[in-house]
Amino acid sequence: MKTKIFYKTIIIGFLLYCLFCGSASAAEMLNLEPVQFDSLSLRYPIILVHGIAIRDHGFVVASWGRIPAILRDYGLKVYLGNTDAWGSIESNAEIIKNTVDKVLEETKADKVNIIAHSKGGLDSRCFIWKYNYGDKVASLTTLSTPHHGSFVADLIQSAKPLHTLAAKKSLEALGKIYNDTYPNAYAVSYELTTGHLKEFNEIVTMDERVYYQSIYSTMNYATDDPIFASGFLYLKRVIGDNDGLVSEYSARWGKNITKVQGGISHGQIIDVTGKTLFDIDITNGQPVDTTWRGRTDVGIPNIYLKFIKDLSDRGF
């Protein structure tokens, strides 16, 4: 009985995220002290690629909170990846390719900088590898990406009810709710497992023409983010430090690794968790209210400003 309750708690916590969000060198520590640059410029435009349970347009929350507006205030060219919330890694890789092609055509730039959260990092890695786009991508920054798989996904996959016909139909409905182009939530639940990502990493390797970096955070306490509390406690027990959905072990990938201080959850790092629901401007379908009501003590935009400044210094 206790086991069933625990399974349900983990899955309910994950569904709440869906509704309200959405070995290498030693890690550098990135703090959240306020930063202010007189200017900030990049040679290439930015494309933001979200993870699962998130849409770039027309859903409950803005996929990146205040981030796009703040970056644009600095004069940076920022675009959204427009990937599916429940698309497979390969189908989203194709969407990213189409987005990159459009951005390059519009901006007349030679390359793009991709910033990708969670599964979006896997989608982006697959895109670069599958389409051999290393000559068109200057950098890929992954944020809290489960490069080595998610133990939460393993737990969900091990639940027999997930594989019933009724469950599969329910997962299909998720794609319709999110208005996905190529929804496949059942495949996504498998693609995020540790077993599948082990195989993925053996095949989808780095492109030497691209600068890769992995940035991640961990929660300090379950109270850091109630939506991710159950996931945090479970992962803390089975694998160690985590952000409520992705473990520190899984997020550490490549040679350039940075850990963000401050007890930040998987949703908070993209400025989403804790946001109010917003109204939709019926003229263009865009959010008109992005009031922040969550971790006001945490300067989430500082994370982006600091690593983008580093990308700028590197000539990207």
Image: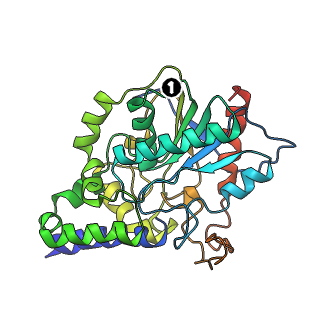
Query: Does residue 191 appear to the left or right of 20 in the view shown?
Result: left
Q: Residues within 10 Å of mark 1 (few under 14, many from 20)?
A: some
Q: Residue at the spot x=23%, y=53% of the render?
A: 154
Identified by mark 1, the residue type is Gly
> In the figure, residue 46 lies in which quadrant?
top right
Does residue 116 appear in the picture of this structure? yes
Q: Residue furthest top?
A: 208
- Secondary structure beneath disc 1? loop
Query: Does residue 276 appear to the left or right of 239 in the view shown?
Result: right
> In the figure, residue 86 lies in which quadrant?
bottom left
Relative to 6, is 193 above or below? above
Relative to 73, is 22 above or below? below
Q: Position of residue 149 (x, y in %)?
A: 31, 45
Query: Does residue 27 appear to the left or right of 5 in the view shown?
Result: right
Q: Residue at the spot x=45%, y=29% of the render?
A: 254
Q: Nearer the viewer, residue 79 or 17?
A: 79
Q: Position of residue 82 (x, y in %)?
A: 51, 54
According to the picture, the residue beneath numbered tag 1 turns out to be 134
Q: Nearer the viewer, residue 263 or 13?
A: 13
Q: Residue at the spot x=24%, y=42% of the render?
A: 196
Q: Residue at the spot x=30%, y=71% of the render?
A: 173
* Colouring method of the image: rainbow
Q: Nearer the viewer, residue 62 or 21?
A: 62
Does residue 145 appear in the picture of this structure? no
Q: Residue furthest right?
A: 38
Instruction: For the C terminus, give its image quadrant.
Output: top right
Instruction: For the N terminus, give its image quadrant.
Output: bottom left
Q: Position of residue 249 (x, y in %)?
A: 38, 41
